[in-house]
Image: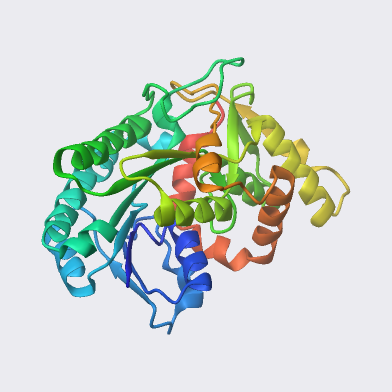
Amino acid sequence: MTLLVTGGAGFIGANFVLDWLAQSPEPVVNLDKLTYAGNPETLASLQGDARHQLVQGDIGDVDLVRQLLAEHRPRAVVNFAAESHVDRSIHGPGDFIHTNIVGTFNLLESVRGYWSALPQADQQAFRFLHVSTDEVYGSLGHADPAFTENHRYEPNSPYSASKAASDHLVRAWHHTYGLPVVTTNCSNNYGPYHFPEKLIPLMIVNALAGKPLPVYGDGMQIRDWLYVKDHCSAIRRVLEAGRLGETYNVGGWNEKPNIDIVKTICQLLDEMRPKADGSSYASQISYVTDRPGHDRRYAIDARKLEAELGWKPAETFETGIRKTVQWYLAHPEWVSNVQSGAYREWVQKQYSAS
């Protein structure tokens, strides 16, 4: 019994691998391209653990994926592999098309070939779990009900459009070929090992470095925030008991405007790592020009997952954000090592006030 996890050195994927191996003896083969956001250091605690094998490679590499499937004979594939940053997709959409659409297609075809040749009992037990995002649904008005699994797809960025396409491919491979798939669409994740280009880790890192805390537009964009370890527990539950061909929305029931998130982080840092001069980190908040096509609000209705599979998030935003800030304060070496020169150039380019 083995899992093949793709993108398992990225933020959510690595947390899933770490959580899985903390709770299960079942081995994990971890396929990751190890681009800027795939960080082997996140998995350092697994060094020497025979249950974990990290393989550098692309989900679009058909020969490699087929080799791994034939060698390890996994009972399930959990697909986290994706380009996932909206801002990067605006500046360079090509990588998103290549990985999220073409890569998913190649992965599905490799897995379909493997699954088709399995004995009938193994075919029936096999699962392909595709991890996606709430951004495929588009943007909500302030009073609109939260996204359900039946909400129409209306992606607004190259990133979300590429993820929507990958969702459609996964659905089609189930309905056309019978591949036993389940899909999860999650809200904004946060927590340990988050690459510091995303909102929460960027604010923590910039605050501690005495840099501006760049907030897009008026900061009133609303997101539903999901602690990453809660997301991992939801994926485990869907993998265990989700109905074939179904989609499950995973959310934290924590809608917050971005500016409130930033102010909360400042308050926690004021408490945990006060400045020598006694001033608040909130003085570093800086409003910058909004990004093109910035969705105003996302919100996930996760009642289907709760009703069918009994899943609920364990963390409130208040408990989760406190744990997150504490983690970054306790792991400055991880932050330092992940901040390459290329990353600093990217942040300068993306968030320079104008």
The answer to whether residue 150 is above or below residue 168 is above
Asked if 35 appears above or below 348 in the picture, the reply is: below
Q: Is residue 333 left or right of residue 197?
A: right
Q: Please, which residue is most extreme toward the front here?
A: 121
Is residue 61 in sight in this rendering? no
Q: Please identify the quarter of the rendering in which residue 149 is found.
A: top left
Instruction: Note whether 110 is above or below 187 in the view shown.
Output: below
Q: Tell me where residue 18 appears, x and y as whole percent.
A: 49, 67
Number of marks in the image?
Answer: 0
Q: Taking 140 as reference, is 10 left or right? A: left
Nearest the eye: 346 or 259? 259
Using residue 39 as the reference point, say whether residue 120 is left or right of it.
Answer: left
Q: In the picture, which quadrant includes the C terminus?
A: top right
Q: In the picture provided, is 315 more to the left or to the right than 37? A: right
Give the residue at the far right of this rendering: 278
Q: Can residue 5 be seen from the camera position used here?
A: yes
Q: Residue at x 24, y 57 (%)?
A: 124
Residue found 53% across the figure and 23% down from its top: 290
Q: Nearer the viewer, residue 167 or 91?
A: 167
Query: What colour scheme does the image use?
Result: rainbow
> Vertical placement of 153 versus 95: above or below?
above
Q: Position of residue 263 (x, y in %)?
A: 74, 37
Residue 137 image point, x, y percent: 42, 26
Write the residue at 43% across / 82% down: 49
- Asked where in the image residue 90 lies, by quadrant, the reply is top left
> Percent x, y for residue 291?
48, 25
Q: Quadrant of the N terminus?
A: bottom left
